[in-house]
């Protein structure tokens, strides 16, 4: 492998780690970075072990910072969503679902910025909404690999302390990603993984996780919220563009 692709792959692994360390949604840029040099499916398969390793490190880093109430509700709902996503995947064009997920995130950002306001009161967690958005998170994570928008639509309005938000997100997505492994194995996603390269990338992923935790701790709660909302906005626009492009290609075919 030549030097520039190796550097790009290392950057993508570092982005995954940053996301697991607390800079939620930044990992959405990882696959597009690799897609410069390889197809997105190969890129996603290459990064899958890095996600799992970074998940493990993130769970350890946030083992004391999480909302137990949210996890008790959202992890089972998210796992149910993975099962539903497995059943829906052959029936629903992933491009259409990707657009829908992007619109969810975009609607949340616009509502938070222009209607409710950034300084509005926190919205308490509740079971019906938690079950709905948890299931949507699991479905989106499985079908479009982008569970962030529905997750953040439910959790961000609670205005949890930044480390509690980051820890809750990291732990929940670790459980959801682990639940997806059997499906990935059945699809052969890990059959061609270069484990020597994975070992090198794991170092970048772990370093990114530690740096993400440091960054989340260093910034103020207000600046952290602004950063996460900004990343969600960028992610949502990218999902809408990506889904629209893929849907047009599907219709054209």
Image: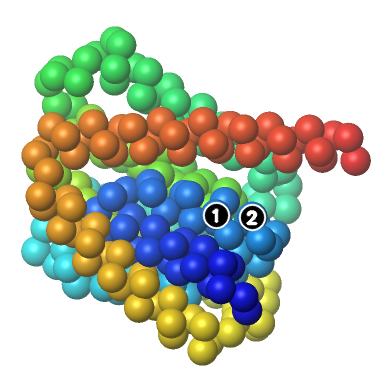
Q: Is residue 231 visible?
A: yes
**Image marks 2 and 1: residues in contact by CB distance under 8 Å:** yes
Crowding near pointer 1: few (<14 within 10 Å), some, many (20+)?
A: some
4, above or below 65, in the image = below
What residue is pinned by disc 2? 36
Q: Residue at x 39, y 58 (%)?
A: 15
How many numbered circles does the render carry? 2
Question: Which of the image's four quarters has the N terminus?
Answer: bottom right
The structure residue drawn at horizontal position 68% and vertical position 40%, both measured from the top left corner, is 95
**Which of the 4 image quarters holds residue 92?**
top right
SS class, disc 1: helix
Q: According to the image, label 1 marks what residue?
A: 33
Q: In x, y percent, where is residue 193?
A: 60, 81
Residue 167 - label: none
In the image, is 160 to the left or to the right of 172? left
- Determine the residue located farthest toward the front in the rendered image: 3
- Residue 21 percent location from the top left of the image: 25, 60
């Amino acid at each position: 492998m030549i030097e520039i692709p190796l550097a790009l792959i290392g950057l993508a692994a570092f982005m995954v780690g940053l996301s697991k360390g607390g800079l939620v949604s930044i990992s959405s840029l990882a696959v597009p970075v690799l897609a410069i040099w390889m197809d997105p499916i190969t890129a996603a398969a290459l990064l899958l072990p890095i996600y799992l390793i970074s998940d493990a490190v993130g769970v350890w880093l946030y083992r004391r910072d999480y909302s137990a109430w949210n996890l008790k509700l959202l992890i089972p709902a998210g796992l149910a969503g993975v099962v539903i996503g497995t059943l829906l995947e052959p029936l629903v064009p992933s491009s259409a679902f990707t657009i829908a997920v992007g619109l969810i995130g975009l609607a949340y950002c616009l509502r938070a910025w222009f209607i409710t306001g950034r300084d509005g009161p926190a919205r308490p967690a509740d079971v019906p909404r938690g079950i709905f958005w948890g299931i949507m998170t699991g479905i989106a994570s499985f079908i479009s690999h982008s569970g962030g928008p529905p997750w953040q639509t439910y959790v961000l309005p609670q205005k949890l302390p930044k480390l509690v938000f980051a820890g809750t997100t990291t732990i929940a997505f670790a459980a959801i990603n682990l639940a997806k492994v059997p499906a990935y194995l059945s699809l052969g996603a890990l059959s061609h993984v270069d484990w020597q390269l994975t070992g090198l990338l794991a170092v970048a992923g772990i370093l990114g996780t530690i740096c993400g935790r440091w960054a989340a701790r260093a910034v103020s709660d207000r600046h952290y919220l602004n950063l996460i909302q900004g990343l969600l906005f960028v992610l949502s626009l990218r999902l809408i563009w990506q889904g629209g492009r893929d849907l047009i290609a599907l219709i054209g075919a």
